[in-house]
Image (tube, rainbow, N blue to C red):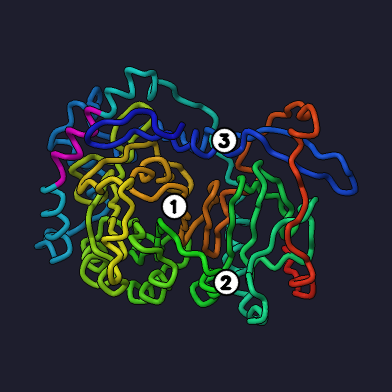
Amino acid sequence: MSVVCAHSCGWLLDSCSHIDEGLQRCVAYSDGLEKPKYFRCCFKREYFNTVTPHVQIQPNTDILASTAKHAKIDLQTRKKRKRKQRDLNTGELDAQIYHGKIRLVVLEGSRALLEAGRQCGYLTDVLTTPPSESMSSLECRLAALCDMAKQLPLTDDSVETPVQTLNRDGLDPSLDLFSYITENPFDCAYEVTLMKEKYLLPPRSRFLLSDITRMHPLTKSEDRFDLIVLDPPWENKSVKRSNRYSSLPSSQLKQLPVPALAAPECLVVTWVTNRAKHLRFIREELYPYWGVEVLAEWLWVKVTRTGEFVFPLDSPHKKPYEVLVLGRHRSGSDHAARSSAVEELPEQRLLISIPSVLHSHKPSLSAVLKPYISPEPKCLELFARSLQCDWTSWGNEAIRFQHSSYFTRERVEEPSGTSETPNITPNISKSAFSSLPSVDIV
């Protein structure tokens, strides 16, 4: 279970456990073999092995004794920067004011949740295996391939449903991953070969690989979602320096067809960095433009495996938390139509977890948002980099963290009896898209 413990102030989450939940029963077909292989997978724990804070503070000091002295940065680091004393700009002043408002909430809420986590045996083990970086070159190719795919013709308007399901062996070279939503309709995870690489698709997951200019398969599918989560590639200096991914200007986010994808009373959740400029843009421009009413701001607090903040709480440079802005899409009489089974959204909550060392690998919000959306919801993640059971994921790297190299596997016995064997049969004819060109990684 991804929720280790819950408290009135929020939740302590185990991201690895959530990923593993959908991969306890995996199926793969080898080339030319009729008999499938059965196994279970686990996301490699070394990717969640943040042991010490990124900025060291005085020894023998943990989150339970956090004070303002945590903001002191090593003098040698400060000298290297040779930063001149100057007045804070408007954005820095806004960030300082915001931090002052939520500081006590973070400190006291983290204290309660981490203490509860330790009591149940969490935050007590440290891994020693370093993560592998062998996937970095492959990961970058997904976005490049999406850019190349713009040369492909748009999907034929005569195709009623722009969705393609996997065939029996997952090796269909005609699958067009860039113009159709690809679906694993089965109740087990499925290892498939896409563009000559192996990926694990969770049960009943769907995805579309494309950029913001090729989102029409989502709107044409006629699905309307009860929950939409966005993790935009915000512009910032760190991204420009590292060149880790392409950022998107805030103004272009308005092009996202969120109103067309949102069901009545849809819950819209957006991850945002700690720049006051971005937070203000969401609250004052983006959400009003989409017809979304801002209802809450939650905080994701990042801690090490021993329960320390990954950055000093009062660091003037980087904070150990990120913000989530939550709101509901309103149109006409939507408010009155909301199900009575849906709980009122709390204005402020904390989500605490050990962050992944993989960039922009956010924790899943499925479990914590469940009380605030309708039963059996349709859920969509925009700018996704991984897949989830029963979710649709969109982005130019939507399957990035589903590559099989991120997982360990353990062979399991073949299910006994035909009733346990997954029905690996396509439910859509390939003829609708068999003529489309395929894209291979060379």
Residue located 60% across and 70% down the image: 146
Callout 1–callout 3 Cβ contact below 8 Å: no
- Where is residue 428? Give x, y as percent: 73, 62
Quadrant that contains the C terminus: bottom right
The answer, for residue 77, to whether it is visible in the render is: no
Numbered disc in front, either 1 or 2: 2
Q: Badge 1, how many Cα within 10 Å: few under 14, some, many 20+?
A: some
Residue shown at 61%/37% (left/top)?
23
Q: Residues within 10 Å of mark 2 (few under 14, many from 20)?
A: some
Dot 3: what SS? Answer: loop
Question: Nearer the observer, disc 2 or disc 3?
Answer: 2
- At horizontal 56% and vertical 49% (from top left) the residue drawn is 401
* Image coords of residue 82 (percent x, y): 22, 56
Task: Give the dominant element type of the magenta stretch: helix, strand or loop.
Answer: helix
Q: In this rendering, would 1 be left or right of 54?
A: right
Find numbered disc 2 in the image and state the secondary structure of the residue it sits on.
helix
Decide which of 51, 27 is in the foreground and name it: 27
Give the CA separation, mark 1 to mark 2: 25 Å
Whether residue 124 is situated above or below residue 426 in the rendered picture: above
Q: For the point 56% across and 69% down, which residue is it?
A: 221
Quarter of the rendering containing residue 158: bottom right
Give the extent of the magenta segment: 102-112
CA separation, marks 2 and 3? 33 Å
Residue wearing tag 3? 44
Q: Work out whether 423 lies above or below 328.
A: above
SS for dot 1 = loop
Q: Residue 360, which numbered label?
A: 1
Assess whether residue 354 is covered by the magenta stretch: no
Residue at which label 2 appears: 217
